[in-house]
Amino acid sequence: MRKVWSTAQVHPRDRLAWWIDQFSTTCQVDCEPRRGAQFFGECSLTDVAGVLQIGTGATSAQVLNRSARHIARGDDRLFLTLTPAGRSLVSQDGREAVLKNGDFALSDRTRPYTFTSDGDFSHTVLMIPRDLLVSRVGSAERFTAVGIDGGNGFGGLLSPMLVRLAAQFATIPADVQPRVAANVLDLIATALLSGSGETHVSAKMTHVRTKFWIEMHLAESLSGERIAAACGVSVRHLNRLFAREGTSLMQYVWERRLARCRRDLTDSTMLHRSISEIALSAGFKDQAHFSRTYRARYGRSPRDDRRSS
């Protein structure tokens, strides 16, 4: 589903008032355009798999202010704002991030923030349910108004994909879209975690980062020592963190391997991949061991689950 707002359909003398009314009502922000009769604005809103919303558009210079009046109306989502062209400034929680050339930053709708542009600019905004991102990164407050470089590093890889996301989702089969949306959230969380520049990392954040590192390296030979070294902590510390969830570090690794295999075995879009290929890509080196472990965990053989898909 896609909605579009544009000043192109409005008489020039009415465009400014129309935009302020439409944009302020829809986005629940105070809108202060910086240009009078020459103001232009266009914005589209796309629903993604019933999980995310993506806003894209281009406007003249303006200031958007999320005030206490709007916050009182509700909406606890997190917004990831990306500026492909032009320049903008996001201010929240005592921090400021200048965004340009594909840079992006997070803002929290439950607290005041200001978004300022000093000229014509384009934008892409991912509107994310709070629980879906917080479960991946922990507390959101530490990431608000922290700019992620859209031209280098992990941000440089992710930024072009986010810019094209709304247009490309229309070409993705509906039954695959929720999985793609989940993967996009994983990538956003990874960018936030890797770009936050924190010198002190809490135990909760260490736990989250470790899980992401494991997820990205499941197909490889993993040991407690290798995981701990990559995450900059001790094996003992990681086992203490995972013990809080009633498991251990390596038990978690095997659970994730089994979960990934089951996900792919029951996915109709993965029928072109053999069972042994799926097991190998999740880190199982021995097919017999994989089959025994899978049956013990799910009460069904890998082949049974493949047939059910």
Image (cartoon, grey):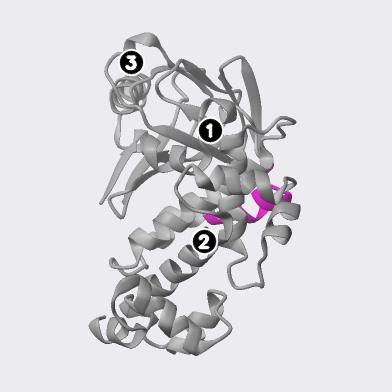
Instruction: Determine the main secondary structure of the stretch shown in magenta.
Output: helix
Quadrant of residue 299 within the rendered picture: bottom left
Residue depth check, mark 3 versus mark 1: number of the one nearer the observer: 1
Mark 1 lies on residue: 106
Cα distance in 3D space between marks 2 and 3: 46 Å
121 in magenta: no
In magenta, the rendered stretch is 149-161
Residue plotted at (30% across, 37% down): 9
Chain-order first, disc 1 or disc 2? 1
Mark 3 lies on residue: 70
Chain-order first, disc 3 or disc 1? 3
Q: Secondary structure at mark 1?
A: strand
157 in magenta: yes
Mark 2 lies on residue: 251
Residue plotted at (44% across, 17% down): 111
Could you tell me residue 38's position as x and y percent? 47, 25
Cα distance in 3D space between marks 1 and 2: 33 Å
